[in-house]
Image: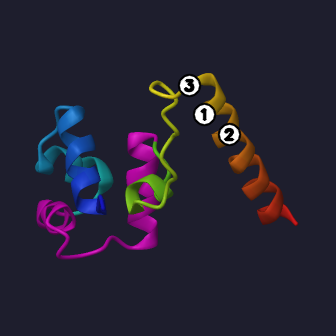
Amino acid sequence: MVNLGHRLRALRIQMGLTQLQLSERLWVSKAMISSYELDQRTPSYEVLIKIAKFFNVSTDYLLGLDKPDINYDNLTEQEVKAVSAIVDLLRKKENA
């Protein structure tokens, strides 16, 4: 399971930022960024939202709650139809 710290660190590195640079942009200390990345602390809701907006991702993504995209690349046409039918049924059940 991917955790917030892992995703935060990956996003920070992807943008070429140091912990200090990110902390300055989010108005938190460098120590706080480090503790988030090490999963020693969890950001407040306010900071979590700032992080999500800064990186243009959802809070669900940061928290590991997002649903992964279905990869249809290695499926046959018949298997794709079967998976799509199951997903449709599950969505209908959720909305009922």
CB under 8 Å between discs 1 and 2: yes
Q: Is residue 3 above or below residue 7?
A: below
Could you give the CA–CA distance between mark 3 and mark 2, rounded to whole angstroms? 10 Å
| x 23%, y 60%: residue | 5
Q: Residues within 10 Å of mark 3 (few under 14, many from 20)?
A: few
- Residue 85 image-quadrant placement: top right
CB under 8 Å between discs 1 and 3: yes
Q: Which residue is mark 1?
A: 79
Horizontal arrangement in the rendering, residue 78 relative to residue 56 (left or right): right
Q: Which mark is residue 76?
A: 3
Q: Which residue is mark 2?
A: 82
Secondary structure under badge 1?
helix
Horizontal arrangement in the rendering, residue 96 relative to residue 82 (left or right): right
Q: Position of residue 37 (x, y in %)?
A: 18, 61
Could you give the CA–CA distance between mark 1 and mark 3, rounded to whole angstroms? 5 Å
Could you give the CA–CA distance between mark 1 and mark 2, rounded to whole angstroms? 5 Å
Residue closer to the observer: 22 or 58: 58
